[in-house]
Amino acid sequence: MSPQSDPAGLPRLLVRMPAHGSMGLAEHLALHGELPFAGRRERRGTGLLVDLVEQAGLRGHGGAAFPLARKMRAVTAGAGRAPIGKRPIVLANAAEGEPASRKDRLLLESLPHLVLDGGVLAARAVGADELILCVDESAEVALRSVTRALSERERAGGDGLRIGVQTVPAGYVSGQESALVNLCNGGPAKPTLTPPMPFQRGVRRRPTLISNAETLAHLTLIARHGPRWFRALGTPADPGSALVTLSGAVSHPGVYEIEHGAPLQSLIEAAGGTIAPVRAALLGGYGGTWLDGPSIPELLLSNDRLAAHGASLGAGVIALLSAEACSVAEVTRVTRWLAEQSSGQCGPCVNGLDAIAGALEEVLAGQPSAGVGKRIARWSTLAKGRGACRHPDGVVSFVASALVLFAEELADHARHGPCDACVGPHVLPLPTPIELAAAA
Amino acid sequence: MSLRLKVNPIACEAHGMCAEVLPELIALDDWGYPILNERPITPELTALARRAAEACPTFALLIERDTPDHQER
Amino acid sequence: MTTIAAAGPSTYWYLTRSTGAVSLILLTISIALGVAGVSRLRSPRWPRFVVDALHRNVSLLAVVFLLVHIVTAVLDSFAPISLIDAFVPFIGSYRPFWLGLGAVAFDLLLALTLTSLVRRRLGYGAWRATHWLAYACWPIALLHGLGTGSDVKSTWLLALNLSCLAAVGLAVGVRAITGWPDHARIRGAALGASAVFAVFLVLWLPGGPLGHGWARRSGTPTSLLAGAAGK
């Protein structure tokens, strides 16, 4: 049964998205059909469902774009080697620590059964008997929606596995895979040293499949409509659709569903067009890459196409920086926040990011110490790849592309200090406000 | 099959004893954290490498065995 | 009984007292080295891995001297000390409380040594937690020496004890101050406790081990007191 959609094939996930509240179970089933693979426990992961996922080419939507089928096979392989009683476990990751991303929260608030169906299917695919939904502890509406959805499913007979909710404390790195495992094991939401990888030994020492909420939503539809339907949109390397969170200098910022490979320009038009000339676009989130405004017309939104520009979609975060805002203040503020978001466990990250943020603050204030550019480059090399997780790597990439793109503005601030736009409204969102002395 | 130095960045507290024992392969960055030479450890330095791992008070320095199908992190 | 006492202290008695004193010195040095290590004191001529290795070796040497101290005390026929008194405190017949403190200190030192020998298997967190017992072990050992030692009143031994006390006091001071104001409350409490201990000693020693009739008051069996000449 094909979903009802417009001739372009969209929307898929967001079809009939309710304007208020969440879509109930009955409407969800009426719209998408019954949950397939019901009652069939695929114990070895080489089952039909994993094959479908592989044929569909579904990749993760949490930022790493890792092929889901490969992850599932790794988990079942790990389970095959594990002693009896170590059934795999599935974590649905909706922690969404990226401040400029809202897609996972939207799914939970409005279309929770898409995510829950996906989680249940993933559990069946890897032979798991437990599903844990990881939700930001401050996402009250989402938590209420999920609770309601779970009791709906319970009343309808349940899904044959234990489904629980784990609230995740706020934090940029709290949703990192090993951090979630750590949290579910009773520890803090801080990354741990890998190996062992979660798919080998994760929650309660069981092979753990961790999948982003949106990825599971796509899984829900692939299981119902098949890989060919999924591949009808998108590109061969990046098939299907994706949710992106568009913010900044557009008329209607928010979450949109795009076809992979669609031009950024068409997304901007769908969002009502720009409200100011665009200086630069940030792709991939705060661990992503800055691209020049004039390059926007040629940008196609898929990882393989963006790779040519040194960027990626990441978790589908796109922020447009208007020419009226101060790029230096924005970058500095976010970098300082990212430095504070370090879990504080690894010296190169804690010290390196703090030093880089400090250097940017100096430049913003017009009081750079000698050779500040070289020192930032040196600290970037020292921070990159020397932490337990990829947080410092992301920050280094974010700063490096900013240094290149905003070289003029940076030089200007270094010489003359804060500009008029420094005290303007903040563009890039941050959960906890960072006030820089220079902007006062 | 070769041996390589590896550090657990979470356990590391920048005591720097590893760099004292094995300066040939370990340098310290601006904050005292180890920068490892990740190439295989030569036979002449293997004993010293083990002493360096022994000297680490937090067991952060590790010596890993490379096997043919070992996946790099 | 009197004849044995009148025959004078045996070689064993000399050995047990001297190895006891040396053990205290070694434990003092061990604490100083341990503090130097964890406080990351840097010296161009002393690499930290050397300081660490010295700390471990001095501690092991202290254990060796303590074993001699215990064995010779047991072998000596003057005081009725049996081997079990070295491990189980307060059950002996010779100065049970003060000797028992020695058993407590020795038990703690055994725990410190054994946990350090298997520290890799134990894991860093558990090892670190048990290693704090070192700060409990030392003052108990000192009190044991002051309470049991028959030479306490001699100037050189008193000077030795006070020097060791000063050294450990300095080490604890350095340990508490390095990294201030992190954990300020615990550091303050540690400094306070050390000061209280020092004051206690100053107030207690003159009327205690340095005072009259300490041998009797500390629990020396009456049968031995006759020949001990009130020492």
Image (spheres, coloured by chain):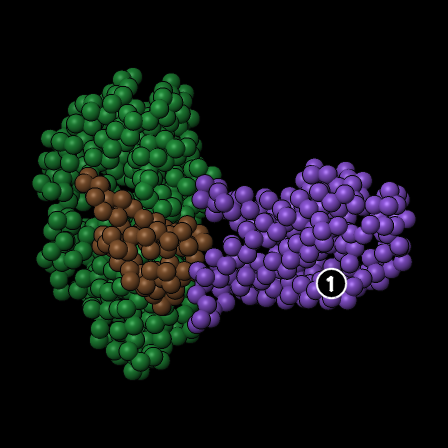
Chain colours: A green, B brown, C purple
Residue at the outermost bottom position: A415
The residue sitting at 37% across, 26% down in the picture is A86
In x, y percent, where is residue A271?
Answer: 22, 52
Vertical position of residue C1 compared to residue A349: above or below: above
In x, y percent, where is residue A347?
Answer: 39, 59
Mark 1, residue position: C157
The residue sitting at 79% across, 44% down in the picture is C79
Pinpoint the chain carrying mark 1.
C
Q: How many marks?
A: 1
The residue sitting at 69% across, 38% down in the picture is C83
In front here: C160 or A439? C160
A37 vs C211, left or right, is left
Q: In which quarter of the image is residue A368?
A: bottom left
Q: Is residue A369 visible?
A: yes
The residue sitting at 36% across, 75% down in the picture is A362
Give SS at disc 1: helix
In front here: A377 or A112? A377
In x, y percent, where is residue A127?
Answer: 30, 24
C150 vs A331, left or right, is right
Amino acid at the residue labelled 1: Leu
Which quadrant, please, contains the C terminus of chain A? Answer: bottom left
Which quadrant, please, contains the N terminus of chain A? Answer: top left
Q: Is residue A118 visible?
A: no
C211 vs C133, left or right, is right
In front here: C170 or C150? C150
Dot 1 crowding, Cα within 10 Å, few <14, some 14–19, many 20+: some
In x, y percent, where is residue C26?
Answer: 60, 58
